[in-house]
Amino acid sequence: MKNTIIPRHMAIILDGNGRWAKEKGLSRSKGHVAGFETLKKIVPYIFNRGVSILSIFAFSTENFKRSEAEVSFLMNLFVNKFRKENKFFVDSNIKVIFSGRIASPLPDNVQETLRELERLTSHNTGGILNVCLNYGGHSEIVDAVKKIVQGGLRVEDIDEEVFEAYLYQRLPAIDFLIRTSGEKRVSNFMLWQLAYAEFYFPEIYFPDFNEEQVDIALEVYAKRNRRFGGIQDETESD
Ligand code: FPP
């Protein structure tokens, strides 16, 4: 697989933890734990394959509508995994950043854990893991507009490049989006950044999305023909 085209910025909607667990007769919580174990395997692998930035959807603003027990389990999981396993991210040379409303209703200990992991990994150079947590694509755009208005910008100062600087992170556009579990929706994930992304929907629950699945996905991407609204080459123009 040498000389293949690798996406610079890849994104994954981690879907299907609950269904994976249910099919095995396990609790949904076990599915989320298995999802994290999968992440630990594939994130370093994805960076080793040459991807520079990986954005993942860990918890949406809408996920607060789930049962209190599941929300509270996930909040504890974030603290447990991002605090107690911070050595994994530090040793893997992964720079972890968080996008979303890192504020209430996220519990204080979650907010502190996320900030601490950002601080601990801020000088790492082996790939950027952008974890979207309490994140919504509409909220990100609304929050950017609020910052622009608060900053007193004039209408004539604003263009797409300026607007992008007010999003949660300064990251290049997403090249390739994967949503596992067979669902074919964007679900309010990184709407601005996905404008020209290629989409891929493997029929596999996230906990089963292993290194081999990553390779298959990267092959799918390499075969896509990206046009950005134009035409691919001169020979196709007549
Ligand atoms: C989607 O599966 C998954 C989530 C809402 C949570 C994502 C969290 C993880 C993969 C755990 C990762 C842990 C950390 C620390 C980042 P679902 O519950 O929507 O599955 P379903 O659609 O089958 O019910």
Image: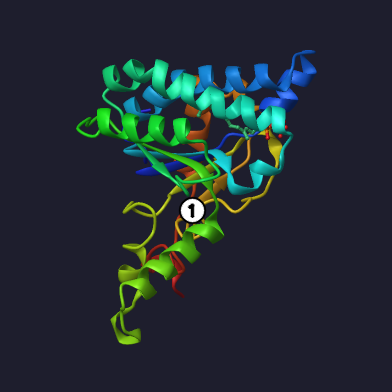
As drawn, 115 above or below 188: above
Q: Is residue 16 visible?
A: no
229 displayed left or right of 65: left
Ligand 1 is found in the corner quadrant, namely top right
Q: Residue furthest left?
A: 123
23 displayed left or right of 193: right
As drawn, 155 above or below 220: below
Q: Name the residue under label 1.
A: 197
Q: What element carries label 1?
A: loop
Give the amino acid type for the residue marked by disc 1 in the picture: Ala
87 displayed left or right of 185: left
Residue at horizontal 71 percent and vertical 43 percent from the top: 65
Query: Residue 173: image x %, image y %?
Result: 39, 54
Crowd class of label 1 (few under 14; some 14 to 19; many from 20; radius 10 Å)? some
Q: Which residue lies furthest to the front in this view?
A: 108
Q: Is mark 1 within 8 Å of ligand 1?
A: no
Q: Nearer the viewer, residue 218 or 71?
A: 71
Q: Which colour scheme is used?
A: rainbow
Total count of labels: 1
194 displayed left or right of 7: right
Q: Which of 145 and 7 is in front in this view?
A: 145
Residue at horizontal 58 percent and vertical 44 percent from the top: 60
Query: Residue 194: image x %, image y %?
Result: 49, 55
Q: Which of 137 and 13 is in front in this view?
A: 137
Residue at horizontal 35 percent and vertical 17 percent from the top: 88
Which image quadrant: the N terminus? top left
Q: Can residue 122 be seen in this view?
A: yes
Indicate the quadrant where residue 35 lies: top right
